[in-house]
Image (cartoon, helix red, strand yellow):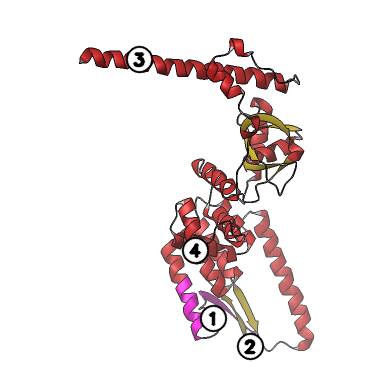
Amino acid sequence: MAAKLNFTSKVRAGMAAERVSAGERLAEADVVNIAQRDAGAPNVVDTPATQPAEVIEALEAPLSLHAVRKISVEDVVSNPYNPRAFYSAETIDELAESFATQGQITPILVTRLAAFPGQYVIVDGERRIRAARSRGDKFIDADVREGLDNQNLYLRAYHANKEREEQTVFDDALAWKKLLDERVYVDQVELGVAVGEDPKHISKVIALTSLPPYLLQRMAQNRKDVGLGHAYNIKLIFDRAGATVAEHWLQQVIEGKASVRKLEAAASAEAGARSVGPRRTHYQSRVQFNRPDGVALGELKLFGDGRAELSLKGIAPSDQQRLAERVKAVIEQWASEMDTTGMT
């Protein structure tokens, strides 16, 4: 019995070695052909007499199904269902420098769509094409795949970004809304199955699209500090109290001063204030002003959300403009000092 197992193992090992050898010969043939093509020579392959049968079969397969080639940068268009919306200029610059020192290591993945005749649509590689354009490159290496529909166009790019940990819920929010708006997926249930997420999660993420783009951008830039729980509650605060209050709480999160629980409490407080009438937020401190004879002039109230309210009374009409100019000068001087010290 042991002898039979040993014989079988040897046969399998021999078959595996043949497959590895054939694969290596195919890879060598691809390298030669790509090098010749890059140098401007016509496509050249070894004659069938010198190639193993499996290599001949691979080389004779239709090039349109899967081929790496150089394509014109001008012929490349972005993925209409790009799962990423936010890119860092710094990372694009770093990649451009890498191109200069190491060349392009990984081809971009592209396909063709009837909506973009004569052009290549990016499936994966938006950062690489941006880096190439920033360098003024005329050509870029591309892995060309045919027969991809809109769902494949999104999912391949989505999973590639997830594997590199580049995808954020803020990218997902914009991409998922577009996929549903354009009926690429019928509803949140079908989309959830495709991306492996619960429909409730899908709904919560898409709700972030009601935030202004600049707030989403800032959240994406600080994704290490701002999670979905933070973002969703800031969205609720934005809906109930406006942009200024939402910006204040976002800054608190970025500085590590506001947890999800604290944001939930703030959102609930805003909801309660909204339900009983005009929003009334108690000030944290105030400064009172009096005339030399002791008559009250007014007060300056300071609030926890970053607001300050100045209220004065008894100012003669002839003095109001002069007072306004002085207050303006003081505030502008203060703002200038804050800006130069980097504290804004």
Foreground disc of the pair 4, 1: 4
- Residue in front for this viewpoint, 323 or 275: 275
Mark 4 or mark 3, which has the lower sequence index? 3
Given the image, on which type of amino acid does mark 4 rest? Ser
Location of residue 160 in the rendering, given as x and y in whole percent from the top left corner: 53, 41
Mark 3 or mark 2, which has the lower sequence index? 3
Give the residue number, with chain letter if any, for mark 1. 279
- Residue in front for this viewpoint, 306 or 126: 126
Given the image, on which type of amino acid does mark 2 rest? Asp
Assign a secondary structure to mark 3: helix
Foreground disc of the pair 2, 4: 4
Residue 11 bears which disc, if any?
3
Give the residue number, with chain letter if any, for mark 4. 203
Give the residue number, with chain letter if any, for mark 2. 293
Label 3 crowd bin: few (<14), some (14–19), many (20+), radius 10 Å: few
Mark 2 or mark 4, which has the lower sequence index? 4
Location of residue 189 in the rendering, given as x and y in whole percent from the top left corner: 47, 60
Quadrant in which the C terminus appears: bottom right
Asked whether residue 162 appears in the rendered view, the answer is yes
Given the image, on which type of amino acid does mark 3 rest? Val
Given the image, on which type of amino acid does mark 1 rest? Arg
Mark 4 and mark 3: Cα distance apart in space: 55 Å
Assign a secondary structure to mark 4: helix
Location of residue 76 in the rendering, given as x and y in whole percent from the top left corner: 72, 41
Q: Is residue 74 above or below residue 4?
A: below
Mark 3 and mark 1: Cα distance apart in space: 81 Å
Foreground disc of the pair 4, 3: 3
Marks 4 & 3, CB-CB < 8 Å contact:
no
Marks 1 & 2, CB-CB < 8 Å contact:
no
Segment tinted magenta in the rendering: 267-292
Mark 3 or mark 1, which has the lower sequence index? 3
